[in-house]
Image: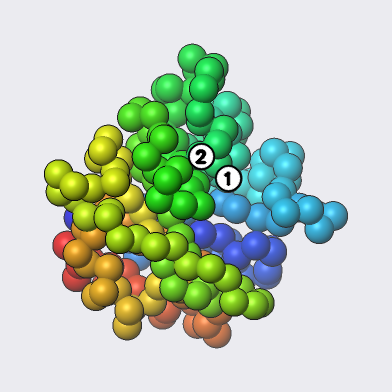
Amino acid sequence: MVQLWLITAPDDFSAEFDDIEEMFRRGLTRLILQKRGRTGTPNATEADYERWLLGLPMECRDRIWVRGTPDMAERLEVRGCLCDAGRLAGDIPPSWYRINTVAACKSVEEITKLPPWVSGALIGPVFQPMSAFEPVPCIDLSGLKTDENSLNPAKIPLILSGGLDPDNLEPIRHIAPAGIATLGGIWNYADPINAFIKMKRAVDALA
């Protein structure tokens, strides 16, 4: 079954927690907590994430992956983390192995270098992201089919992201992704709950 991953909006907004709780009630099982820093830095701090998590019931944390490192995820008591692929190379703390870790990859080449213990590889953008302010290079996904000629020799589950919506999922069906991650495909709409429902139906139909 293909899983839908929702990435949080980069900046907080008033109805955010209500919307996310409603999406959890409607079947969301994977939320990536990824925020900008309060001072305009690209990534929020662990303290920022800790404050943000207080806005949701404790039981929701089992469905949240934080953008950071495995030890941060463990301290925040969330399900896992989305960690830059480069940080997973070489010697890593033994404690990291016990954390559900998804690698954030910027190229297919990074996937080929991932250690086999990671639980997934998030790669994109597949198409132009709806949340981008200007055009960005898209990933060349040729060679990522799940067969003996795949460039994913460890058979790490692939999570595709970037510009995906209910109308353009069919062209990536042949890659057999384990997940589809979306940000602008939900939060760019005036009614994110309805956008989530439509996207979940489309992702479920890929199975």
Q: CA distance from mark 2 to mark 1?
A: 12 Å
Q: Quadrant of residue 51?
A: top right
Identify which residue is drawn at 44% across, 62% down.
139
Quadrant assignment, res 172: bottom left
Counting from the top left corner in percent of width and height, residue 146 is at: 19, 50
Instruction: Report which residue position mark 2 lands on.
Output: 85
Label 1: few (<14), some (14–19) or many (≥20) C-alpha neighbours in 10 Å = many
Residue 53 image point, x, y percent: 61, 46
Of badges 2 and 1, nearer the viewer stands 2
Residue 122 in view (yes/no) = no
Side of 14 where 3 appears, left or right = left
Whether residue 29 is situated above or below residue 135 in the rendered picture = above
Q: Nearer the viewer, residue 169 or 175?
A: 175
Q: Seen in the image, is 63 located left or right of residue 45? A: left
| Residue 71 image offset from top left, x and y in percent | 57, 26
Point out the residue furthest to the top here. Answer: 94
- Total number of numbered discs in the rendering: 2
Residue at position x 29%, y 43% from top? Answer: 152
| Mark 2 vs 1: CB contact within 8 A | no
- Residue beneath label 1, please? 67
Q: Give the answer, above or below, for where 44 lies relative to 167.
A: above
Amino acid type at circle 2 is Ala
Q: What label does residue 18 carry, if any?
A: none
Which of 150/179 is in front? 150
Which residue does the image show at 41% across and 35% down from the upper left?
Answer: 113
* Amino acid at the residue labelled 1: Arg
Which structural element holds mark 1?
Answer: strand
